Amino acid sequence: MIPLYDTVRSHKFPLITLSLIAVNILVFFHESQLNQYNFPRFIYTWGLIPSLFMSNLSSRWLYIFTSMFLHGGWLHIISNMWILFVFGRNVEASMGGLRYLIFYLLAGAAAALLQVYVQPESPNPMIGASGAIAGVLGAYLFLFPRARIASLVFLFVIFTIVEIPAAIILLLWIGLQIYSGLFNTGGGVAWWAHIGGFLFGAVMVSLFAFRRKAIYGDWQ
């Protein structure tokens, strides 16, 4: 199931969402120019490595933020940026540009810190925007629970587009993240970062959204 667009129409230009996407793409373009030696070196330099972070908290906070602009491959960045585009535009409209940017960065930080807490001895670098984007999803759940998400659904050898309530998609998604985190399904995915970002977004949305009634699902 691939989300294509939502039914909530905003008249505000999503400047911050598009700017975040542009920065991520530019960083990834730089990564793609690196050779087989310099690419892993770049990732290990600017990614967040839990074991190093825990051993030197005072000097490694910067990497919480640099890590959320790195990606490991084309599928990684395309999937992340598309989800950010689909769900981020209306969350930005509900918060305003500056509030949304602060919210996004703090969600990414909360995501990274929960992952570090769960796996403090990991020597592997954490990279990707998915923790911050999970915060956007958590906010979207409370801002637009009755919005419908047009999604591409594959049924055996055919596919179709189905409009599915946002609440169903997002609750299923976070349920999968919790299951994967608890039962350690692996795959090199920072499941707890997704959970941390989503919880931050769901809890903190009321402090960032301008229109209080939107938090309770009155926007369609």
Image (spheres, rainbow, N blue to C red):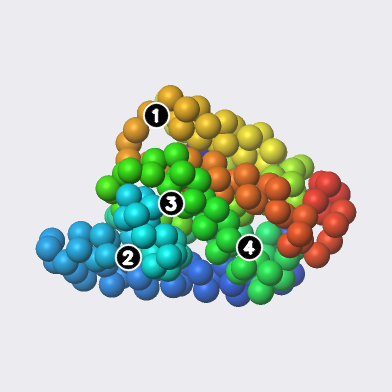
Circle 2 or circle 3, nearest the eye? 2
Q: Is residue 162 visible?
A: no
Q: On the rendered structure, is 180 left or right of 143?
A: left
Q: Which mark is residue 79?
A: 3
Residue at the spot 44% in from the left edge and 72% down from the top edge: 23
Q: Earlier in the sequence, mark 3 or mark 4?
A: 3
Q: Considering only vertical position in the picture, is 147 above or below 164?
A: below
The residue identified by callout 1 is 184
Residue at the spot 74% in from the left edge and 46% down from the top edge: 142
Q: Earlier in the sequence, mark 2 or mark 3?
A: 2
Q: Residues within 10 Å of mark 4 (few under 14, many from 20)?
A: many
Q: Considering only vertical position in the picture, is 163 above or below 52?
A: above
Residue at the spot 76% in from the left edge and 59% down from the top edge: 207
Circle 1 or circle 3, nearest the eye? 1
Q: Which mark is residue 128?
A: none
The kind of residue on which mark 3 rests is Ser
